[in-house]
């Protein structure tokens, strides 16, 4: 009796040991599925993000061409050539098999060609410097990455905003991006891909929202202690709402001159959305120039020298 109970207990413990890992894997898969449904990358709100999502799906399908046959053949071979199957043919001499050599070389070659064509076409189609075809002129916005916030300068409107990017939906937006600190990465998943912001350099990014909405942008590259809080708000507005937003910014009491910019560039976390009704002339260019040392003469009202790197 005791022996039977001991055996049942051993079986139960063994079952528990097998069940717990399976349950853990299942929970992980369910959690991943939930994250997948909430993923901003899979919910594009503009043509650039839509093309990038389609590229992700295309790359996934190409990978499945390799992975699915491998999984199927692995299961097939394990079943067919199991120890108990005495009817399976044993043919170890296949070193000069023409069919096997053709499969081993031609299939990977075709996959490489397919991936090369996909990458070549997508690289040119999704060039971040390439203007978006539209009947409307692009809205120019200058972007400066700081510790740990984002500054958006609107040269045509003569305003600047911290941690909020607004534009009319249906109108292309042309971004000029730089950094006044370490390297950052500008990213709005639902509208465009990411691109680096580097001190002393300028990168470009084009985006377009085809419907009104509120989105989230962030720095996707670690940049220090406040990195986890370096988000910014993105507003896609109707033209009338955008005009009202610009009018609101122009009524702000603060002006972004050189001393104000110096104070703004200091490290801060969870910086609130701040509007500036006027900006220092050529502020964006002077931020880039101050890292160029002898290659550029300092512009009028140039912010002070760059802070030490971490």
Image: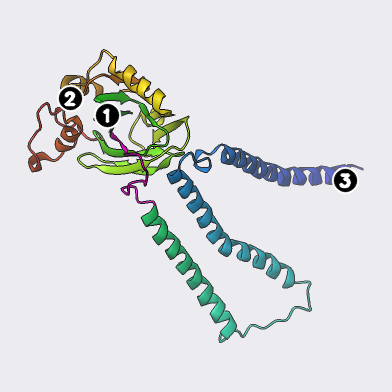
> Rounded to the nearest whole Å, what is the CA distance between mark 3 and mark 2?
87 Å
Mark nearest the camera among 1 and 3 is: 1
Spatial CA distance of label 1 from label 3 is: 80 Å
**Image quadrant where residue 197 sits:** top left
Whether residue 140 is visible, yes or no, is yes
Q: Where 37 sits versus 120, above or below?
A: above
Q: Residues within 10 Å of mark 1 (few under 14, many from 20)?
A: many
Q: Position of residue 286 (x, y in %)?
A: 15, 33
Query: Which mark is first along the chain, 2 or 3?
Result: 3
In percent of width and height, residue 54 lies at: 50, 51
Q: Nearer the viewer, mark 3 or mark 2?
A: 2
Q: Quadrant location of the C terminus?
A: top left
Labelled pair 1, 3 in contact (Cβ < 8 Å): no
Instruction: Tell me the residue at 24%/25% (across/down).
Output: 158
Q: Which residues are magenta?
A: 126-141
| Element type at mark 1 | strand
Residue pointed to by mark 1 = 153
Q: Is residue 247 magenta?
A: no
Residue 130 image offset from top left, x and y in percent: 32, 49
Looking at this view, name the residue that lies furthest to the right.
Answer: 1
Say whether residue 266 is visible: no
Residue, disc 3: 3
Q: Residue at x 26, y 41 (%)?
A: 198
What residue does disc 2 label? 280
Question: Which one is in front, 231 or 308?
Answer: 231
Magenta span includes 139: yes
Camera-nearest residue between 148 and 248: 248
SS label for mark 3: helix
Q: Quadrant of residue 209?
A: top left
Callout 3 crowding tier (Cα within 10 Å): few <14, some 14–19, many ≥20: few
Q: Position of residue 185 (x, y in %)?
A: 34, 40
């Amino acid at each position: 009796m005791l022996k039977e109970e001991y055996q049942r207990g051993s079986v139960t413990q063994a079952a528990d040991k097998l069940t717990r890992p399976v349950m853990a894997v299942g929970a992980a898969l369910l959690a991943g599925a939930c994250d997948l449904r909430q993923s901003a990358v899979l919910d594009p709100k503009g043509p650039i993000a839509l093309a990038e999502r389609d590229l992700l799906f295309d790359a996934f399908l190409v990978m499945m061409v390799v992975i699915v046959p491998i999984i199927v053949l692995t299961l097939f071979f394990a079943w067919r050539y199991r120890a108990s199957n005495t009817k399976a043919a044993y043919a170890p001499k296949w070193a000069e098999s023409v069919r096997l050599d053709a499969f081993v070389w031609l299939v990977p070659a075709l996959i490489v060609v397919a991936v090369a064509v996909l990458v070549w076409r997508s690289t040119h189609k999704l060039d971040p410097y390439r203007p978006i075809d539209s009947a409307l002129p692009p809205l120019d916005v200058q972007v400066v990455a700081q510790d740990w916030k984002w500054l958006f300068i609107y040269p045509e409107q003569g305003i600047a905003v911290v941690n909020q990017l607004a534009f009319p939906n249906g109108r292309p937006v042309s971004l000029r991006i730089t950094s006044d600190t370490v390297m950052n990465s500008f990213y709005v998943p639902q509208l465009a891909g990411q691109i680096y912001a580097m001190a002393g350099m300028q990168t470009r990014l084009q985006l377009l929202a085809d419907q009104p909405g509120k989105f989230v942008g962030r720095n996707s590259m670690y940049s220090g202690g406040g990195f986890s809080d370096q988000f910014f708000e993105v507003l896609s507005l109707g033209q009338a709402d955008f005009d009202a937003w610009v009018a609101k910014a122009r009524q702000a009491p603060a002006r972004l001159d050189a001393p104000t910019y110096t104070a703004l560039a200091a490290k801060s976390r969870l910086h609130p959305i701040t509007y500036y009704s006027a900006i220092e002339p050529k502020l964006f260019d002077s931020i880039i120039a101050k890292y160029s040392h002898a290659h550029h003469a300092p512009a009028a009202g140039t912010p002070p020298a760059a802070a030490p790197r971490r």
